[in-house]
Amino acid sequence: MNTDCCCKSGCNSAACGCCEGIEAVTPLPTANRPGLTALSYRIGTHATFLETMKARLSSSKYPKLAQLTNRETGDFSLAIMDAWATVADVLTFYQERIANEGFLRTATERRSILELGRLAGYQPRPGVASSVYLAYTIDDNFKKETIIPKGARSQSIPGPGEMPQSFETSEDLKARAQWNNLKPRMTRPQTQASVLKDPKGPRIYLKGISTNLKPNDQLLIDFGLIDTNNQPEDPKLYQVKAVEPQHATNRTLVLLQTARKTSPNTFADPAIVIKELTEQPTVQLSNMLQLPRMLNEQFDVNTITFSLSSQQVHKMKKRTGKNASAANEIEFSAVTDTAFAVAKAFSPKLKDTLATATANANVTPQNAIKVYALRTKTAPFGHSAPLRPIRLNENTKIMEYSEWAIENPINYNLPTASFSAVPLHGTSPLTVDFSNQSSGIIDGVVWEIDEVEVSHFWNLTHTFEEEKVYKVRLTVTGPGGKSTHEVNITVEPDQPVIN
């Protein structure tokens, strides 16, 4: 509580602070903004509570306390106030902790989290014991099949300052000496679809890491396919984009270059672009057939499914309530073990040799894909010939030259020349708009009217004056060659007007 100001006239009491004294400072504000990691909910502490009570001893609002004028700490009245300030300090401390435990962001006790979760109907799952993967090795001289019983105990090797942990098997395990060193196949056979239609771009894996390939080297790939005429398809020529040796698997990943097919007048529809950008992503496939479609049918269905007879599938569906695909997966291991048991029953001699013979059998046929690296280079015939003359420049009277074109070295498709003309006929003067609709990989465009070049732009607008039939030709060129398209434009005489 402030006392009467003792400043002289003209003195700023707020600036000098001479008139400040004890005053009521509780309750403190308890408003909190959103997003805090801890709430401030105490209306005061021991010091603020004690200062407030001292201020109210001299307040005119409490005249019955005016006779308590002693402010020494040893006074009984001040001792009582100090005790109540301690009580208020303890109560507000725990009140603030309880308020913090009422929100997920600020709660620190596990029980608070559990109680808040139960309000929304959520209950955490109970804790489970840790699990590990064990590998048992059987003596090579033990030829018979044995069973590792359920509950077989194993102990971990503790580190410094740690205790060993015990683990037990959860079910009976079959064990054979032939299974000590299983060598499962970790890769799929490569096909033309897996090489050319990989979602990350065309690529092929080669055995070993010393291929000596580098970017821009040329590879001739023979996929070993047969065409409709029962003749082997021609090998395809590709260029290396990047080479990545993979030491862990002893193979080399070779990325192949692809030709970019674009058209100068082709632009994406804004509505399609906006739809693709705003489409909600999905983290789960809608059905089992969507994955093969997303992989562009890279793998044959016969290589990833196990077929059963219709009666077996019907029994599995009836017994388990699952669909045919799930029944196939469940029945796969059972059918395999049954086939081994039947073979051993008819021929007991196979008991000791069947597993070894099966392990050494070829699971898949030999891959028919062959890759040839074209390392030897030689100049083409006529490489030392002079530049090819093109035409005489009418302005400079200097002959223009260019390199001799080597026809389609990388198997590019032939571009297709096409255009539309509106109108095709009319009276003089006739203005015609030519819209280029060519497709393929195009490097150059030439428009000709009656064997005379008039433009190298993609589209053409021309006005015809003379009354006759004009031959308009479009020639497009690209790495795969050139293509032409012709259209006749008829300029008719103006008909006389009869009065």
Image (cartoon, rainbow, N blue to C red):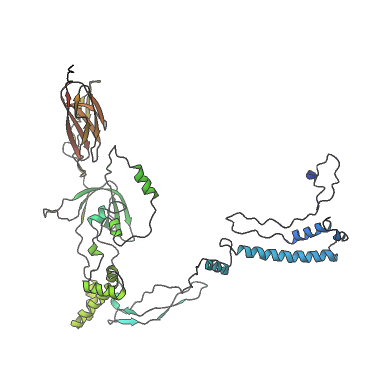
Picture quadrant of residue 38: bottom right
181 with respect to 73 (left or right): left
Which residue is outermost to the front? 499
Q: Is residue 114 above or below residue 488?
A: below
Q: Position of residue 49 (x, y in %)?
A: 75, 60
Q: Is residue 15 visible?
A: yes
Task: Return the residue nearer the eye: 263 or 35.
Answer: 35
Residue 382: x percent and y percent?
16, 36
The residue located at (65%, 63%) in the rendering is 96
Name which residue lies at 73% across and 64% down: 88
Residue under the point 59% across and 61% down:
106
Q: In the rendered image, which quarter is residue 70 located in?
A: bottom right
Q: Is residue 95 left or right of residue 381?
A: right
Position in image of residue 146 (x %, y %)? 31, 82
Q: Which quadrant holds the C terminus?
A: top left
In this rendering, does residue 309 appear at all? no
